[in-house]
Amino acid sequence: MTPDGAPPLREAAHNRRRLLMERSRPGREGVTLPASDAPPQPMPDAAMLRDGLELPEVTEGEVVRYFTHLSQLNFSVDTNFYPLGSCTMKYNPKVNEAVAALPGFALAHPAQPERQVQGALEALFRLQTFLQEVSGLPAVSLAPLAGAQGELAGVLTLRAALEARGEGRRRKMLIPDTAHGTNPASAAMAGFQVVHVPSDSGGDIDLGAVRAEADGDIAGVMFTQPTTLGLFDRNALEMCRVVHEAGGLVYADGANMNALLGRAKLGQMGFDVVHMNLHKTFSTPHGGGGPGAGPICVSAELAPFLPGPVAVRRDDGSYGSETPARSIGRVGGAQGNFGVLIRALSYITLLGADGMLDVSGNAVLNANYLLAKLRPLYDLPFDRPVMHEVVFSARKRPGATALDVSKRLLDHGFHAPTMYFPLVVPEALMIEPTETESKETLDAFVEALHRIDAEAAADESFLHGAPYDAPVSRLDEARAARRPELRWREPEA
Ligand SMILES: Cc1ncc(COP(=O)(O)O)c(C=O)c1O
């Protein structure tokens, strides 16, 4: 409502949202083309020319307003809070962009002779050294171009190590029921047989189920620590011991590393391979399929099989890049996603060792703050302190399913949390605040969720129509992704 009680100015909103064809008026022009400086060319065959091609006729001002408005429809961490669980949508400091744009980085070419790109190679070497430190594992490859690709590279490296032991026949890869979908996909692509392992009643991996599968056919386990339930799995150490004793190797999905930075090392817990999502943990822009980096850190046994190239410091102090002796090969061109790697190094260097402790401390504090503030509204399937994210179940109030709540949050200007994942929680709302959000932002988010709950309490069907203030409301999401309608059509009379 407006202050005088009049209804909202829906027509004004509609006016702003008009498509380019709706702005078109005969005779308006937005561009003057310079005279052609190319010799005139013969026209193509008449059969190839279209008659009456309908193009919008608009002024430059209309075009600028149209595209500027479109750009404002984008939601990003630069516009508001983005608590998309597991995706770690933290603020990406702009200084990272400035560092990545330095000519020595931005203009370096992967085929340049090493002596010309010593600084770029040193930067990669430093990042590797840092990741060794953080993971507690002695060897690193920065080559994988995404978390999922790091997983594939990691399990291929694991398979190569088993083969080198003469144990290549081992096929079973255990995957907990809370795993990110990319884990079983990577294991299957690497030729393993995926065996699902349940969680126990406390939300930890079911050790009985692990023991039951720990036989001569077990290749290993792919495990996320902290888990996608946002929990530090208390059985992880014992799980590593059981799998090792049976002759398998242990893979850690380190995508949730922001909870552990500077506090716990996955290598010291017994994991043989860890992938990290630099684009999440170390603040580089991502989402929408944008660039990422999923380096893998491995134990000494697995080091010879790492994907290349790996940055090295030679005895004379110079830097180079080499492919490990028995490498599984390349997983992409050049040196990995160099621009992402540099942004991550910039973040790490900016914060330093103490800053890493702040990252993990605040990520965990923020998630537990939201847990405390939101627990009156939702069910908490595993009632214990969380790490970097909290997973609620929105099954309490029938008029406020996870989808309803998420859609209504858009009207409040917040991005929706992850919904319906992990699969073990019905009506899951997976909320990850990250360490970069202030208490004021978290409080505004909490208030929005309380208001939304009150709306559902007052009218059970109200939230089913949300969002009310977005350009499009409830879409057939699968169809919108697979068969998007991108062409303007004359509205039906
Ligand atoms: C736990 C976990 N593992 C793996 C991945 C896959 O990473 P990417 O999206 O970079 O492929 C993600 C991504 O969000 C994740 O949350």
Image (cartoon, helix red, strand yellow):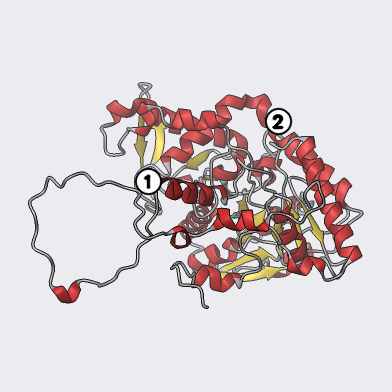
Amino acid marked by disc 1: Ala
Task: Answer with left or right where residue 89 lies relative to residue 19.
Answer: right
**Disc count in the image?**
2
Res. 357 mark? 2
Q: Position of residue 360 (x, y in %)?
A: 71, 36
Query: Is residue 278 in view from this perspective?
Result: yes
Going 79% across and 36% down the picture, which residue do you hit? 440
SS under mark 2: helix
- Tell me: is circle 2 under 8 Å from ligand 1: no
SS under mark 1: loop
Query: Could you give the CA–CA distance between mark 1 and mark 2, rounded to whole angstroms?
Result: 36 Å
Task: Answer with left or right where residue 368 lies relative to residue 465.
Answer: right
Q: Position of residue 449 (x, y in %)?
A: 82, 53
Task: Answer with left or right where residue 276 lies relative to residue 328.
Answer: right
Q: Quadrant of residue 365?
A: top right
Q: Which residue is mark 1?
A: 325
Going 71% across and 30% down the picture, which residue do you hit? 358
For the residue pair 361 and 22, the one nearer the viewer reads as 22
For the residue pair 202 and 429, the one nearer the viewer reads as 429
Task: Answer with left or right where residue 312 lies relative to residue 232.
Answer: left
